[in-house]
Image (tube, grey):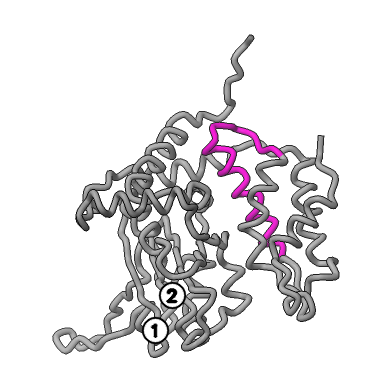
Amino acid sequence: MEKFENRVDLSSLHAACESLKTEISKHIVGQHKMIEQFLVAILSNGHVLIEGVPGIAKTLTAKLIAKTISAKFSRIQFTPDLMPSDVIGTNIYNVNTSKFEFRRGPIFGNIVLIDEINRSPAKTQAALFEVMEERQITVDGITYPMSLPFIVFATQNPIEQEGTYRLPEAQLDRFLFKIEITYPTVEEEYEIILRSHQNRGRTQLEQIAVVFTVEQIAEYQNRVREIIVEDKLIRYIAQIVAKTRTNSSLYIGASPRASLAILISSKAYAAIHGRDFVTPDDIKEMAYPVLRHRIILTPEKEMEGVLTSTIIREIIDSIEVPR
């Protein structure tokens, strides 16, 4: 049987992705789907919102993935009293030069981890709008571009209401993915406990190997854009997103940004699996993390406890898969 050869060279990209998975698995038990979605986001140059109850390694996973990339890493702990200037920076008067100088805030990094993003009020959230969309900051009329890649990993707790603020829809729409982390299985929990017992509480996080350089990420992101997508699959994406706007269970559907997000993430998903073409299954797989934070249930459905993932599945099942 003749072996099929990719038209886009994905060998080094695929190998790097497998190396990252291996490194992360040394410290994180299970959660393979979550790690894969992180990889897709990095290759798509997209931001990630991570949601889950406390204690299931949301922050740890984000830190570990950041450690596998040879790039500047920043961490910001969002609190109710955090001001926009604490995030983006501010102009400081220099007595030696008698001039104001811009002192950069922690948002100036390549990989930025925002812990508990829903703990800061709307004023601070608004400070992220420009930088997440346009990769730049404007202060006192002067624009400061971010060093690329610039990717935000943000965590939030879905169950705590005290001292939290609902993220604005415009803010949510700037995240490529919303990754929901669930509890481990019994076997995974056993492995977590066993590793902790054997390590006697010692950690080896500083020994995690670097997998990606900044230059490699830029190269792989460009390669992902070359992945082949047939016209009928582009129409399939458009049909899925359009259905969210007419579904009776939804108060607000997804914007065209969601269509573009499904397209680029499907390309990245195909690439990390060693394929230079997108399949309908890639699109289905990526539709969930792309859409789940962009659609809003009607009040009636929300009170009934209907999940957005259920509606997404119904929409996907209602559309004929391209052949």
The verdict on residue 260 being magenta is yes
- Given residues 126 and 287, the one toward you in this image is 287
Q: Amino acid at mark 1?
A: Thr
The image quarter in which residue 172 lies: bottom right
- Given residues 105 and 181, the one toward you in this image is 181
Q: Is residue 48 left or right of residue 290?
A: left
The verdict on residue 244 being magenta is no
At numbered mark 1, what does the secondary structure look like: helix, strand or loop? loop
Which of the labelled discs sits on residue 60, or is there none? none
Q: For the C terminus, which image quadrant?
A: top right
Q: Which residue is mark 2?
A: 116
Q: Which residue occupies 73% across, 76% down?
A: 302
Q: Find the magenta span and give its range.
A: 255-279
Residue 218 visible here: yes
Q: Is residue 131 above or below residue 15?
A: below
Q: Amino acid at mark 2?
A: Glu
Tell me residue 280's x, y (percent). Answer: 72, 41
Q: Measure the C-alpha gap from mark 1 to mark 2.
A: 8 Å
- The earlier-in-sequence mark between 1 and 2 is 1
At numbered mark 2, what does the secondary structure look like: helix, strand or loop? loop
Tell me residue 153's x, y (percent). Answer: 44, 63
Q: Which residue is mark 1?
A: 79
Q: Is residue 92 above or below residue 159?
A: below
Tell me residue 41's x, y (percent). Answer: 51, 53
Q: Is residue 130 left or right of residue 145?
A: right
Q: For the N terminus, which image quadrant?
A: top right
Q: Which residue occupies 54% across, 32% down?
A: 274
Q: Are the residues at dot 1 and dot 2 in contact (C-beta closer than 8 Å)?
A: yes
